[in-house]
Image: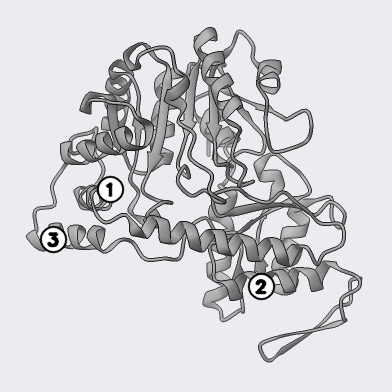
Amino acid sequence: MTISLIGKSIAASATLKINETAAILKAKGEPIIHLGGGEPKTKAPIDAILAAAAVLNSGEVWYTPADGLLELKQAIIRYTEEFYATKVSPQNIIASSGAKQAIMVALQAILDPNDEVVFPAPYWVSYPEMVKMCGAIPVVAYPEDGSFQPTIEDIERVVTSYTKAVIINSPNNPSGAIYSEKFISDIVQFCEDRNIYLIMDDIYHRLIFDDKRPINCYKYAKNDIENSKLILINGISKLYAMTGFRIGWAVANKKLISIMTNIQGHQTSGPSIVVQKAATAALNGVQSSVESLRLTLQNNRDVLVDQFKTFDGIKLEKPQGTFYSFVDFRAYYKDSTKLANFLLDKVRVATVPGVEFGMEGFLRISTCGTIKEITEGIARIKWAVDPNSPNELFIGNRKLLRDWL
């Protein structure tokens, strides 16, 4: 069997793989606690559910335009004006089957083989693979000070004449860090000065804590949208707990959106009419669910941080947003993959290895679950790695004996 060079180079999604493994073990009756997930457990807004049901009940489930329904675009226009103080037209928007597809189509529209795409570490697991799927080269910018806060100098150090784009994700998956306003200002101006595409992955932009406010990238753009290489990515998955609906979008200049539409038209055609109607209703409907989710996640974050304070040697920068924490376990394990497998095998706690996000020795631990899941999951982790813990642990009616420390 012959496989393409690109096909051979692409690894499985670490986050989806851990979801699958956890689901299999849970189906077998194992007492799994999934702290690796990336989706809120709250229900989708009732407005979205009713809108989807109305389409299904009508029986009129037809093709949609390749770039999305006009009514969804109008909702995105209103959203962009409200949260980014920027007016755009329907021709500046493409709706895709998730923010992931919006990013992928954008990359396919702008990249040639051997172009380079820069993003800071830690980074979302899919960025390198998506770049490689375009025949291009992912380039990681590691913050020189070892923190989760990149500087423009960190980016500039790895930018070359082959750099075609920079991807910025803030609030950041996996660290929960919010990049400083100075950095966002610097990167927007830097990319404009260098004539480089800037992809702003804002999928978590309203899930932020401690009275912080979203940072608007357009505030620092000198070029108008039609002369801009700024591509704004967003979607409904995280804010509205609608991960399974698969609707995201990109906002960019009309020429680029037209090219992205051509590509998407040959890939998947337009997104499902059912989920577009649901997304429109979510964006236009009552917004209390977003604030409720944000407050829940902030409380979960606080519980997680307090639990990890009981560990000796653990380092954790308090997440400022998202529903992730990126915990430094190097005092216990240097190999994050071995650690994640060890925790899943010994105490049935699912996490994601930090190496998949570009930083070894860390684990991404989610706060999407319940308080009980977070506290019990972290207690199991502590029992597994802390030599000062007792030798026995009960999980339900099962007694575990520790024989590895």
Mark 3 or 2, which is nearer the eye? 2
Depicted 34 relative to depicted 362: above or below: below
Residue behind mark 3: 54
Q: Quadrant of residue 70?
A: top left
Q: Position of residue 93 (x, y in %)?
A: 28, 29
Residue behind mark 2: 375
Q: From the viewer's perspective, is 202 left or right of 85?
A: right
Badge 1: residue crowd in 10 Å (few <14, some 14–19, many ≥20): many
In the rendered structure, which amino acid carries the disc numbered 2?
Answer: Thr
Which numbered marker is on residue 10? none
Circles 1, 3 touching at the beta carbon (< 8 Å):
no
Q: Quadrant of residue 58?
A: bottom left
Judge whether residue 4 can be spotted in this image: no
Badge 1 element: helix
Q: CA distance from mark 2 to mark 1?
A: 33 Å
Q: Quadrant of residue 103?
A: top left
- What residue do we see at 11% from left, 63% from top? 57
- What residue do we see at 36% from left, 60% from top? 289
Q: CA distance from mark 3 to mark 2?
A: 40 Å
- What residue do we see at 29% from left, 32% from top? 94
Q: Where, quadrant-wise, is the C terminus in this rendering? A: bottom right
In the rendered structure, which amino acid carries the disc numbered 1?
Answer: Leu
Q: From the viewer's perspective, is 112 left or right of 331?
A: left
Residue behind mark 1: 283
Instruction: Name, please, the residue furthest toward the bottom.
Output: 397
Q: From the viewer's perspective, is 182 left or right of 263?
A: right
Give the camera-side residue of 80 and 112: 80
Q: Position of residue 110 (x, y in %)?
A: 43, 18
